[in-house]
Image: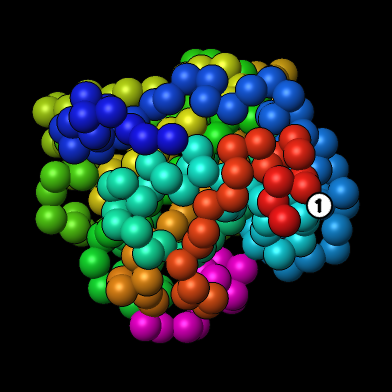
């Protein structure tokens, strides 16, 4: 699958591309069906919310499930990523952010490069984050918020927030966020299941808590150019995978026809 020139221009301008219903209902159902056994696993890569028992994020999924091993090589994710970030990309991180009904907690305003650079020694902000909405995402169930144009700044100042949620994050302070929003506004990433979001390492984003009765799970794959690989290895492997071999896309029907992945 190739992005059009118009889509590439939107990505360059806004720092975010939303591709509605790129994955079919049957494909999303197959992804969702793979989740319950992973929720139930005793794994340090399953991180719970600060309060309550709901899972917050489940990581390293391509090493724990055949379905996710195929999904990280799906051409509808990998080919657009290669168009933007170059041909040789490795799988840096693979997760589902669960954001369960009533329990899903906030993700503070941040940009991913702050963590990739400060914790993992990634040299430049070249990684891409590819999301698939696994539930209908509305204004009510904790959608991602993006600040269009925030990706055009040099890396902004951040501080390490280890208390607000169960997941430590380098976050952007309120004054900086206020100034960015005054220029770019906020775009909520809403849409039906199967919608894909693509954004880069400098894009400032976050999401509010989910106080609705509706779950809001999102799959996230981060791909990074092999030439821009991590240089520091303090974080666990499931937070930044250390196999730097370039990802090779599978056939388009690899989710529903596993034989296509052979
Ligand atoms: O799932 C969310 O709401 C936020 C996820 C996020 O910010 C990220 O993956 O960097």
Q: Is 230 situated left or right of 22 in this image?
A: left
Say which of 176 and 119 sits in front: 119
Q: Specify start and end residues of the magenta stretch as a single range.
A: 231-241
Q: Quadrant of the C terminus?
A: bottom right
Q: Is 222 situated left or right of 237 in this image?
A: left
Residue located 43% across and 35% down the image = 1
Q: Is residue 17 visible?
A: yes
Residue located 38% across and 42% down the image = 80
Q: Is 258 situated left or right of 131 in this image?
A: right
Q: Is residue 56 visible?
A: no
Q: Is residue 108 above or below residue 156?
A: above
Q: Is 34 situated left or right of 46 in this image?
A: right
Look at the image and say whether residue 165 sits in the magenta stretch: no
What colour scheme was applied to this rendering of the protein?
Answer: rainbow
Say which of 4 and 211 sits in front: 4
Q: Position of residue 105 (x, y in %)?
A: 59, 39
To which residue does mark 1 refer? 38
Residue located 26% across and 73% down the image = 123
Q: Is residue 53 above or below residue 136?
A: below
Q: Is residue 20 above or below residue 218?
A: above
Q: Quadrant of residue 137?
A: top right
Q: Alpha-carbon neighbours of circle 1 within 10 Å: few (<14), some, or many (≥20)? A: some
Q: Position of residue 131 (x, y in %)?
A: 50, 39
Q: Position of residue 104 (x, y in %)?
A: 64, 36
Q: Position of residue 49 (x, y in %)?
A: 67, 48
Chief secondary structure of the magenta portion: loop
């Amino acid at each position: 699958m190739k992005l059009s020139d118009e889509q590439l221009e939107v990505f360059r301008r806004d720092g975010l591309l939303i591709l509605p219903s790129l994955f079919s209902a049957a494909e999303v159902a197959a992804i969702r069906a793979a989740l319950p056994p992973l929720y139930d696993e005793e794994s340090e890569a399953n991180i719970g919310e600060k309060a309550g028992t709901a899972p917050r994020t489940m990581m390293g999924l391509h090493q724990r499930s055949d379905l996710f091993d195929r999904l990280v090589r799906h051409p509808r994710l990998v080919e657009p990523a290669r168009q933007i970030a170059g041909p040789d990309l490795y799988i840096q991180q693979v997760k589902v952010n669960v954001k369960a009904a009533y329990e899903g907690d906030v993700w503070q305003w941040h940009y991913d490069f702050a963590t990739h650079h400060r914790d993992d020694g990634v040299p430049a902000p070249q990684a891409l984050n590819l999301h698939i909405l696994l539930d209908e995402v509305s204004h009510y169930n904790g959608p991602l918020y993006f600040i269009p144009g925030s990706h055009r700044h040099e890396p902004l100042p951040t501080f390490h927030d280890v208390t607000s949620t169960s997941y430590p994050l380098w976050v952007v302070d309120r004054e900086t966020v206020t100034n960015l929003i005054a220029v770019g506004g906020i775009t909520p990433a809403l849409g039906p299941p199967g919608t894909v979001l693509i954004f880069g390492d400098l894009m400032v984003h976050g999401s509010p808590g989910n106080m609705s009765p509706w779950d809001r799970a999102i799959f996230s794959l981060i791909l990074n150019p092999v030439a821009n690989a991590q240089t520091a290895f303090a974080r666990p492997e499931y937070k930044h995978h250390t196999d730097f071999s370039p990802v090779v896309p599978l056939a388009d029907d690899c989710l529903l026809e596993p034989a296509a992945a052979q």
